[in-house]
Amino acid sequence: MVPSRARLRPLGTGDVRLVGGHWGEFQERNRSAVLPHVEHWVERTGWLGNFDAARAGGLPADRRGREFSDSEVYKLLEAMAWELGRAPDPELEARFHAIVARVAAAQEPDGYLNTRFGRPGQGPRWSDLEMGHELYCVGHLLQAAVARARTGHPDDPLVRVARRAADLVCAEFGPDGRAGVDGHPEVESALVELYRVTGERRYLEQAGLFVERRGHHVLDEVEFGREYFQDDVPAREAPAFRGHAVRSVYLAAGQVDLADETGDDGLLAAVVRQWRHTVSARTYLTGGMGSRHQDEAFAEDFALPPDRAYSETCAGVGSVMLAWRLLLAEGDPVYADLIERTLFNVVSTSPAADGRAFFYANTLHRRELGAVPDADEPSPRASSSLRAPWFEVSCCPTNLARTLASLAAYVATADDEGVQLHQYAGGTVEQELPGGRAVRLVVATGYPADGEVRVRVDSDDERPWTLTLRVPGWAVDGATLTVGGTTRPVGPGAVAERRSWRRGDEVVLRLPVAPRFTHPDPRIDAVRGCVAVEQGPLVLAVESVDVPGLDTVDHLRVDPSAPPRAVDGRVVVRCARVTPPEPGWPYRAAPPPVEARGFEDVPLVPYYTWANRGPSTMRVWLPVV
Amino acid sequence: MVPSRARLRPLGTGDVRLVGGHWGEFQERNRSAVLPHVEHWVERTGWLGNFDAARAGGLPADRRGREFSDSEVYKLLEAMAWELGRAPDPELEARFHAIVARVAAAQEPDGYLNTRFGRPGQGPRWSDLEMGHELYCVGHLLQAAVARARTGHPDDPLVRVARRAADLVCAEFGPDGRAGVDGHPEVESALVELYRVTGERRYLEQAGLFVERRGHHVLDEVEFGREYFQDDVPAREAPAFRGHAVRSVYLAAGQVDLADETGDDGLLAAVVRQWRHTVSARTYLTGGMGSRHQDEAFAEDFALPPDRAYSETCAGVGSVMLAWRLLLAEGDPVYADLIERTLFNVVSTSPAADGRAFFYANTLHRRELGAVPDADEPSPRASSSLRAPWFEVSCCPTNLARTLASLAAYVATADDEGVQLHQYAGGTVEQELPGGRAVRLVVATGYPADGEVRVRVDSDDERPWTLTLRVPGWAVDGATLTVGGTTRPVGPGAVAERRSWRRGDEVVLRLPVAPRFTHPDPRIDAVRGCVAVEQGPLVLAVESVDVPGLDTVDHLRVDPSAPPRAVDGRVVVRCARVTPPEPGWPYRAAPPPVEARGFEDVPLVPYYTWANRGPSTMRVWLPVV
């Protein structure tokens, strides 16, 4: 994404390389396991075959999957495109082209491309804007093409396919066309992005039409109300993100893209206000968004039950996309704080350790040992304590794949004065600043396990520039910065060092990653009387597999006077086991006596790693004694 | 219902009359407001007109409403039948006959009666047992006929219609027929009840087939899993009620009916075990059942969030039906305790004070001032803080109507030794005991506002018999019984007095109805650190309209050291108002200071009366300071 007027500029593809460590390993797992797994399942389910059937005239009889299944193929293509940009590979390139060819063959002469609508026996084109996901699918097609264009292939066949599809959208939904929008926002951001890589201004204007139309009851009412797809009130008037969480954050991302390209400060200010409200009152400790299973939606302020946290993986992806755009637009490190939190605790949580199963929803409290999901069949969305290989609605694995492949994009930015590091991962950052000042940085860190981040200058131009580091919001006490042999305390926010850097100069940021208790806002009823444990950017959790003799972690009570400690590489908290009351009517005239049996050290694990050792119960929020 | 082998016998229609007081007024409101309102809406929505369209050959083109809309007409007929039994009235009788005639005219020659299936352009009969609700609709038709038969009209045209429908069900689903069950249990209990009034044993046997088939994956998987309609495990193996709450308790009611008639002690024991588990761990303070909006279902044990309490009115009705059957079968007053709690706090809560709007879901915590529901259009199910006149799925108003019209049935029972009073309401109870001992009791009480219940003997036969009174489970301290001038303390459970009663003898039960704090089981995470206030059988609530200057009741904190008090006829609790933390990331390294501003007396209202004074926020569970 290359916005025109933002405070900060994203770096180009290839300017940041991640090597090893948490994110390097996730990227390797994405390439070696997630991508082939996703390819396997889009074939197996027939979702890719739908394009072949379209070409062969076999639709609708041979169509498989839900109305949005085309988009999974596009998200796979996007993931492959980013991955090819990260690490070219002829074999992967061949797989990419083969899929593009099958998709392209299904495109109709006028540019229309969707396997679910428009043929005899199917609904007419654009006949179900509320739930048909046609424009949503176009949006993901465009995003895949943008990824391809950004990674050195602006004239790729996929880009041509996308442009023809976008041209048709502009013709159909333009100023003189259908005054509609899609029930699932996505095409808005995609059109702005396609404008950025093609320069075709109609795409930007079409995005503007979609954004401005929405909120005026342009869609028909659905079961969950117009709030579900943000058609309840106009963008500038909404107080917070609301309705379906993924729809809401995707829309906001498109609004920021649009505001950025058009200089619409009012629209940007509205999104900023909504973001602040949402982060204050509608966001889980993990960064997860959406607490309602029924409509996969945001609930009212402070209705954040850990045991019904929906916290959809895709909402986490969308939140990262949105916060990134706001970071570029505003430059405020709080956006990078949420990106970090969400990457480590939502995006990292979805994939299994082997990269072949996924969480769709990311609960913060699992009460029961779950069944093992079927390895050979798609699973329901939020039904087990264990990750599933695929879902009937399988948006999350592909969304994860494209996010992991493009992770490097979120690490650093530049402006005319220098380079900003927002996320800490081992690797390199290169950028040419105005005036031809070539900057190269080598980052060495064991973060987040280790709080030390060493940034070494690996370039020779000694004209001054500014290196800016983010001290995370959680590092309220104890962070230090060492530059030129001098160490000073630093607090949350942006820390800038401007100087004539010489090759070999080193800046060391030391972040306090001792485990710590975290206390909730008293308005969050569902976690009253509880604490969580965090360590650096990681939310920790207790899992029953680590507590011998207990099937449920619900019988543990934490001693809040004993801070969590790191012991032999594990974090432990001091807990008592309590005996629950006898069965019977659970509401009594006096508080039932809670009998605590001694205290013991109970180990915690990073939340993102839970449920990799068989069925387990789990808690992030722990009641205190 | 007249079960054959139960411990206790229900009294006949007309044996109990309720006069004035809480329930007398509800019955009057039901007759004067709810019944005409329901009639109006089943006409207006076309759900009654569907039967006319069936006769006229206008289906499916002219069909209106969801797949179960026929059942609302049957539940209305059931309500009218009970009401005619309670208080005959030619005008109501004429309305009843007119509807029966329209229904009967739609019945096909072989007895099939459903406006949604079986015609050209509709699905074939019995083609969607999972979600089609065909047998469910038959069940409600049978229940309406049973009500008519029980109230003195065993040969009513409605009974003939029902028998023909039941005969077809037995032919289609009998031992040699389709081995299916309905996705929504209901017909099981209805068939046993029809057997009881007709003596036709095939109906009982058919109920047995339906009960035994279920749980063996006889239905296709649906989105919410087979647990949704209790087809996951056989009846005898399930540990608790689970899945869709209404389906679950309706099924259990049918199982008790069946066990009772067949002497199946194993089946009865299974239901008792499941009921005990459910009441211990899956039931709200109000008696409400079901905490998941998504599938209107029971959640895991102790997952009872007040702000997402679904607590569907129909689940309350079903729970009363079930507990009543268990009370008859087992004789244990704990079942009557739950009936009382559910009648006062779920069933009483649904209708507005004017009887023309209803809660479908009965939340225990409302966070936001809601919009006013549309007075002229059906509402979504659980979308507002205010009651709505009708719903797209409108099972609750008709279920309420039939329950209120038949309330007297739940008041008293008899056995060979005497009469048992289970619920306290002003009125009369008559019963002829074995040997021709005619018993008549006059009950005078202002219960539940007043804890004094005076039971006067109004009959002359002086042969001894036993009067048994229930001391509610909540009356743990302070209840007394006065008999023959002697007063003694009594505790929760059944209190029996056997003697030669003479006309004018009086027994006075005094129940302690001072307001009291109630504490939750520590495993209910969602209400940790909170207390509720109860008064007699009533759950109380704080409503923002009673707290000047506060839009939200979420900023109140109760002083748990100051017991609730009755002041000038209102109950008050001592509360501080707290200032919430500043907006920002809501998870902090230290608990945010909670600044309490003084203390004030905050009035509470009976929960069932809330939301009758405009949009309001409301809490049952109040955080302590």
Image (spheres, coloured by chain):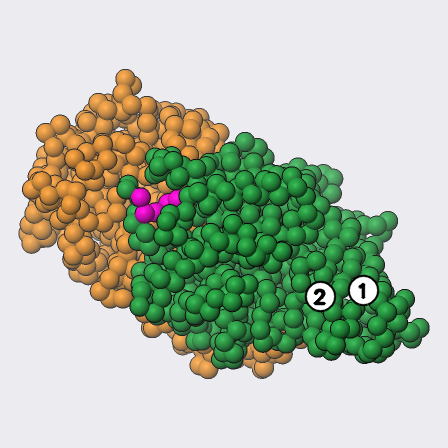
Chain colours: A green, B orange
Find disc 2 in the rendering and name its residue: A412
Does A5 sit above or below residue B138? below
Does B173 sit above or below residue B244? above
Q: Which chain carries label 2?
A: A
| Quadrant (top left, top right, bottom left, bottom right) of the C terminus of chain A | bottom right
Disc 1: CA contacts within 10 A as few (<14), some (14-19) or many (>=20): many
Residue that appears at 48% across and 53% down: A160
Residue that appears at 26% across and 44% down: B68
Amino acid type, residue under disc 2 in the picture: Ala
Q: Mark 1 lies on which chain?
A: A
Main SS category, magenta section: loop
Which residue occupies the extreme top position in the image? B176
Residue A552 lies, in percent from the top left, at 65, 43
Q: What element carries label 1?
A: strand
Does the image show residue A478?
Answer: no
Which stretch is magenta? A114-119
Report if residue A118 lies within the magenta region: yes
Disc 2: CA contacts within 10 A as few (<14), some (14-19) or many (>=20): many
Q: Which of A250 and B360 is in front in this view?
A: A250
Q: Nearer the viewer, residue A366 or B279?
A: A366
Find disc 1 in the rendering and name its residue: A441
Q: Which of A349 and B466 is in front in this view?
A: A349
Residue that appears at 19% across and 38% down: B121
Q: In terms of sequence position, does the residue under pointer 1 or pointer 2 come before the other?
A: 2
